[in-house]
Amino acid sequence: MKNTLFQNIKYFFTILFILQSTAITQLWAQQTPVSQNGQLKVCGTQLCNQYNKPIQLRGMSTHGIQWYGWGKCLTENSLDVLAYDWEADILRVSLYVQEGGYETDPVGFTNQVNRLINEASERGMYVLVDWHQLNPGDPNYNLANAKQFFTAIANQHKDKVNIIYDVCNEPNGSGVNWNRIKTYADQIIPVIKSIDNDAVILVGTQGWASFGVSGEGSLQDVLNNPLQFDNIMYTFHFYAKSHRDAYLRVLDQASDQLPVFVTEFGSQEYTGDGPNDFAMTQRFIDLMRQKKISWTSWNYSDDFRSGAAWQTGTCASGFWDTSRLKEAGLWIRDKIKFPADDFPGGDTSSDQTPYKGTPISIPGIVEAENYDNGGQNIAYNDLSDANEGGSYRNDKVDIEPCTQGGFNVGWIQAGEWLEYTIDIQNSGSYILEASVAATSSGKNFHLEIDGTDISGSIQVPNTGGWQNWQTVSTRLDLSSGIKVVRIVMDTNDFNIDKIIFKDSDVPDNQSPSVTIASPSNNASFIAGETVTITANASDVDGVISKVEFFVDGNKISEDNALPFQVNWTAVSGTHIISAKAFDDDNASTFSSGITISVEENTDGDSCSEAQYVESGNYAAGSIVQNLGSRYECKPYPYSGWCNGASWAYAPGEGSYWQDAWILLGSCSSFSSTNHTDNSLQIRISEEYQRGKDNKIFVSPVPADNFLNLRLSEVSVRSIQIISLSGNILLEKVITNSKNTPTDTRIDIRSLPSGIYFYRINSDHKTYNGRFMKK
């Protein structure tokens, strides 16, 4: 009797457990990112779900799977943690092509990628398949392998809705401009689309996926020659400790005009190592959240660098608790989990959304091509069968490139209309200015809100050509709030570029605004150093046509494309840097000046090799001197970078010089300068001595893991280590007596090889010097 009762109770709870487990599994299946969003697509500048709603995916990138792949850092347990604890939406699978990757074992690595796709898919995550070409930087070098790999992957997974393809990770190097990348993309994209036609495909941009900020060209190159395929996005990478405001600005500008996916970033330096800058990273995170830019962070491994999420040894231990996370891992886990995903579904009353995710602010500019998302009879009514201009968007609305920049709507027929969600800041009277073109007179259109004509008939004159633009204007009254305005075409055959809403109390043309973004005020440089000067410029009622740059009131150069930036070779002395911005009506504004100081270069050089110069026709094995040291140009395929831009590849000082050059050692003048016990004695320049023979001893030369400083007759409050670009990398606070020599030791193991400044801050003075780390 007791046995029977016990067996019945046991049977009951077993059945209950199975039912509960099944219910939990079914509930999770309903809540995964893939189940909620389905097949993704590109709508306008946004990544959208199956309901045509813009979404943001947040997740992690693996490290190279040849080092940290399946069975190592990627296991069933670690992927469970990523999907269910971190609540990641997406896993980026990084398949290196070289460096022991795909080219060494195509079958084996294809199988491993297949396994990781299946594992991530079982957990309801999207999978970004990353063709991680890096060295060489030209994606065309690996075109044959790319075709082979993506053909295999697309055939295997074409029926899945969660696959995203990234066809070139970080194009880079001399000559690898956007046109070179587009040549590759135009060949590899059709290979994938012929098999998996509805998949989203990502394409890396020039300069290590930076739209040229870190290399050749600019964002404008891509805007002038975009890819002509459906469901295409452009990638952007940043490392917040190294890549700061200039990169943030370009990401903001690019995502206004192109669909952008941030497939790799970190809070560290560009090496994926070094100190974290969470404050700067948060600025990127905030922008990406605001604009629904999807992202995957680097990297989900236990690599020794600070950018890896897990502490070294975690993968081997198989223990995936949060106590094993590095500082960066804890931080990025929080950014993935919070705030929780809030994916829009298909149960709302309307699918209409603003083209760029947020309503257009009025006063402001409504670009005709940026009508709302939603499709035919929701956001627009177009009477043609396809986009006659074949540009910008994949809807039926007819769009073509515009000679004024950007795009315009054309092939207009009476009865067509376009809608725009706007946010009117203040109730009142506004001036409407429309940029239009036509080849005959008698054309007109009007504006409506909620079915009411708010503008009356707006006449379009004969401008003498489809791209001969004229401005027509009228006055209208608007009430504040978010509204949907409709442009209704009353006749055939005219073009519209944009409509500008101006506050009627504001002058017809407002002057632009401009400030110096970098360098910072009171920054210090060494004579001969390349100073990158960047300006922020904007115009509330038009566009910036150019920015001129001045040093001490003398114009040195100008730039007419974002980012507004020029280089200047520093000369000794104190200088005032300013900029002058011009808008499209030729109104101009001068910025406030910032002051920089440039010290004489006292290092000297007694090397026999020639001094490095930018674009010096260097080949593998070329030896040069720069900043008191000797460097050898690396062998092919890296040798081409030796002739790259000096800000990036100048030996010992460019941001990426180690990719191109090998440090051979110091010049003899460096090693023969008044030594005491293998120390370098540096006398502070006359402007700081004020009649006293203050001395600072630095050792060893060059420095290795630690920098030793002996301070005599200097009362010190702090010592800072500063990059050549002016960023404070390390700081040590100390207190000493002016009358007692002080020895201090600074740990510089986190710094890559190169030239750095030290700054010694005392009560009343600042002492500067320079040192080299091996």
Image (tube, rainbow, N blue to C red):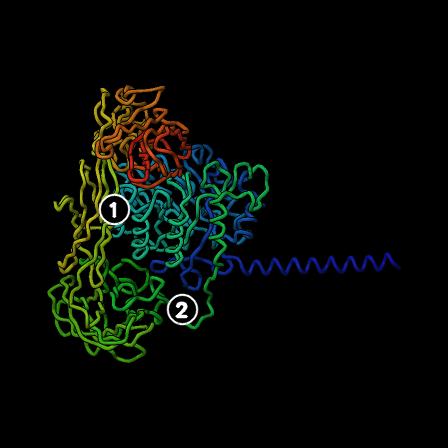
- Left or right: residue 435 versus residue 265 is left
Query: Is residue 178 in sight in this rendering?
Result: yes
**At x 14% / y 57%, what residue is drawn?**
588
Query: Is residue 615 in sight in this rendering?
Result: no
| Residue neighbourhood size for the residue with mark 2, other residues' Cα within 10 Å, grouped as few (<14), some (14–19), many (≥20) | some
Sequence order check, earlier mark of 1 and 2? 2
Residue 664 lies, in percent from the top left, at 32, 23
Q: Is residue 324 above or below residue 671?
A: below
Residue under circle 1?
521
Q: Is residue 353 above or below residue 276?
A: below
Task: For the N terminus, give its image quadrant.
Answer: bottom right
Residue under circle 2?
351
Task: For the C terminus, give its image quadrant.
Answer: top left
Residue 313 lies, in percent from the top left, at 55, 36
Determine the secondary structure under disc 2: loop
Amino acid type at mark 2 = Asp
- Left or right: residue 734 versus residue 34 is left
